[in-house]
Amino acid sequence: MLTENYSSATPVARLLEGSRVYLRPINVEDTELYYNTLFHQEVRRLTGTQRSFTKEQIARYIEAKGQDSSSLLLLIALQEDDRVIGDIALQDMDSLNRSANIRIAINEQGNQGKGYGTEALVLMLGYGFGICNLHRIELNVFDFNEQAIRCYEKVGFQREGVQRDALFYNYEYHDSILMSMLQHEYCARYVEKAKS
């Protein structure tokens, strides 16, 4: 499970900060932490993870993400105790079309449904629209992940379509729902609202 506390004596780089969570860069030192989440059965089901990975593959993946200008992978940590509870990523950033994909995982059921994911999404969307100058951010969510669908709709994502039978998991096919948010929708909901 992706939970780890950092000593208060160790300064933690915080890229984005909210009231209850902050988003920090992932480092090669986080390999063990990240690797362990890939074998949490519920996280695997919710994300549709089918493959297995070695620690060496994960270390290379983390290192490559740090060099990849088309993506940003961050860990989600709690403000109260610096405990890492998940990860979030902007991926496939396309500067010509000003679009990207976003994904998030809150890794322990005890941390789900508390608004941490919502806050992390709003922070990352603000970064994508306000810093990276993106126009459109999309995501895919499997039809059985009703809690995530509610979270995305609450944040302001709109359903665009369904990819039928896109995932085969546990002996059955599942649909993938495509959702997106545009920059002006984010601004109307979060930026202009904060100004008034």
Image: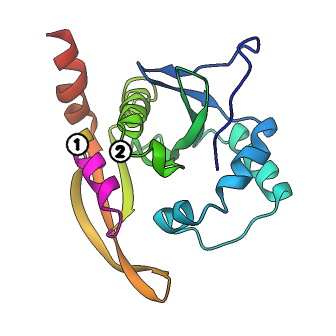
Residue furthest toward the front?
110
Position in image of residue 57 (x %, y %): 80, 58
In the rendered structure, does residue 177 fall within the stretch colored magenta? Answer: no
Magenta: predominant secondary structure element? Answer: helix
> Is 18 placed left or right of 88 in the picture?
left
- Please give the count of numbered marks on the rendered protein: 2
Vertical relation: 167 (above or below) 69 = below
Give the residue number, with chain letter if any, for mark 1.
154
For mark 2, give the secondary structure.
Answer: loop
Label 2 packing within 10 angstroms: few (<14), some (14-19), many (20+): few
Residue 104 in view in this figure: no
Residue furthest toward the left?
196
> Is 84 placed left or right of 34 in the picture?
left
> Is 26 placed left or right of 32 in the picture?
left
Q: Could you tell me which residue is drawn at 24 percent across and 24 percent down?
A: 190
Vertical relation: 61 (above or below) 30 = below
Mark linked to residue 113: 2
Label 1 packing within 10 angstroms: few (<14), some (14-19), many (20+): few
Disc 1 marks a residue whose amino acid type is Lys
Disc 2 marks a residue whose amino acid type is Gly
Residue 187 in view in this figure: yes
Magenta-drawn segment: 143-153
Is 116 or 132 nearer to us in this picture?
A: 116
Position in image of residue 47 (x %, y %): 50, 62
Q: Could you tell me which residue is drawn at 20 percent across and 35 percent down?
A: 185
